[in-house]
Image (cartoon, rainbow, N blue to C red):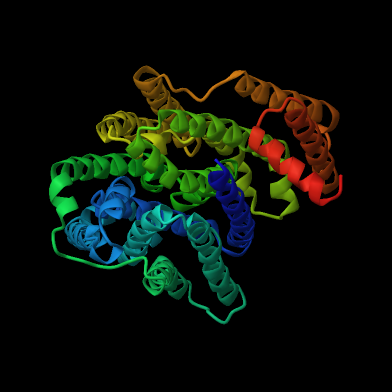
Amino acid sequence: MSTIRQQSIISSGIVYIGFALGFINTLIYARALNPDQYGLIGIFFALGNIIYAFANMGMPAYVTKFYPYYRDRMPVKKIDLMGWAFVLTVAGFIIVTIASVIFRDAVIRKFSEKSSQFVIYYYWILPFGFGLTFYTLLENLAWQLRASVLTNFLREFLWRIFVFGLILLYISGIMTDFGLFIKIYSFTYILLAAVLLVYLLKTGQLYFSFSVSVVTKKFFRKIRSLVLLAWTGTLMFNVSFFFAQVVIAAVVPGGLTAVAIFTLAQFIGSLVQAPQRGIAAAAIAPLSQAWKDKDYGRIDRIYRRSSINLLLFSVAMFILVWINFTDGVIFLHLKKDYLDARPVFLFIGIARLVDMGTGVNTQIIGTSSFWRFDFFSGMILVSLTIPLNYVLAKNIGVTGPAIADLVTFAIYNGIRWLFLYRKFGMQPFTIKTLYTLLLGLAGYLICDRLFGHYSGFGWMVARSTLFILIFGTGALALRLSEDILLVWRTIRKRLGG
């Protein structure tokens, strides 16, 4: 666990620095751009992830699951895994590009009334999706090489630096055309993928072989099954996660303005989920190796410890945001439209708590030989998400997809929890899970009772400080996480305490 803990801490630190920069970017978006422009950026990101889901052809899962088998049996220069992964990913993206041309007229008819700017920049989503697809493929290889700190730096920090530079050029008047901003923005992930590609090539950790190796021949039938099911599973998950912005742009009055409100709430909701990326990335390689070695005890330990660590972070962040949401929008001088993001955040935030509390179940199942279950659980997720999003968006408005998000991800994670429990006797919850939730609730009630009827920056600081003291002290006193206790002891030791 020490390697996972160390990389998780460093990666989580990078993620939070990245989110701080992302917050600055979001603040500038919300203040300097009109809501339609910010909404366009939101739908770019959503559709880029959907393009990735179609184009990746299951290759990231192939790399994640089978790289340990290639590494243990072959010299790195003869591994053909990445060669075939690149070929199939290029083929997948070509298919997506052809489909985007064929369905362009249907898209124009559906979105031109409520989201006309999206129609104008329709084709520029393709380079964004291309870059995201190939970066994610390389990222999965880097995780296997125990380079999760680097990949988190690139995705969470460097990408936001690129975007921050673009925003500065636009708001300073150096770049006067918003259309040029969007066009350059669409190439940011290509630049990121190029940086990671050069690193892997320069360090001698990436070679492209297109001969069919003995390992590929031996595991071909399993690879084929994994690729098909993982691809469809990823497709269903991403469509479920990012479908909300698409349906909002198409059916909710206000179009891209409503997308902007949802996107702001979703970004703030991602703060609740921030540590998950670091912990999940650090856990991938050890989980892959543990499944290969049939070390179920190690998998169970990673499952439990990831759950309580993620839940502690997410509960604290969710309550800190919730008790300060309205004051934050007013203090930061955001447009009044964004006050409507508070109820949206409530449901998205609770959905993220559910997801975080179930630990790294996605990574556990994804690195196992039970990828078929990944497919079937994904089918359930999509079958619920698409109709619920559409119906609730049509009848409730922008809050509807957030409610759908909570319902569907609660069911999805519940099914996956039950599978791991029934199949292996693994489950992430202990009495400490309940203590964490009760501690968070107690901290919220105390802060709300003492400061809930006051507003202003000073009261935001007072509420936040008191909650952190209550929650942090309680977590240490109750010994809710061994990893946090070890970090705390290290800090005290270095401070001479």
Q: Nearer the viewer, residue 395 or 351?
A: 351
Against 368, is 423 above or below? above
For residue 301, side relative to residue 455 (left or right): left
Q: Quadrant of residue 362?
A: top left
Against 253, is 467 above or below? above
Q: Quadrant of residue 189?
A: bottom left
For residue 248, side relative to residue 76 (left or right): right
For residue 230, side relative to residue 193 (left or right): left
Q: Quadrant of residue 464?
A: top right
Please provide percent x and percent y for residue 341: 58, 42
Q: Is residue 116 visible?
A: no
Q: Quadrant of the N terminus?
A: top right
Q: Nearer the viewer, residue 394 or 132?
A: 132
Q: Quadrant of the C terminus?
A: top right
For residue 125, side relative to residue 477 (left or right): left
Q: Is residue 352 visible?
A: yes
Against 137, is 389 above or below? above
Please provide percent x and percent y for residue 471: 75, 32
Q: Residue at x 32, y 49 (%)?
A: 68
Q: Nearer the viewer, residue 261 or 19?
A: 19
Please provide percent x and percent y for residue 114: 39, 51
Q: Residue at x 59, y 45 (%)?
A: 271
Q: Residue at x 44, y 75 (%)?
A: 180
Please provide percent x and percent y for residue 323: 72, 36
Against 233, is 59 above or below? below
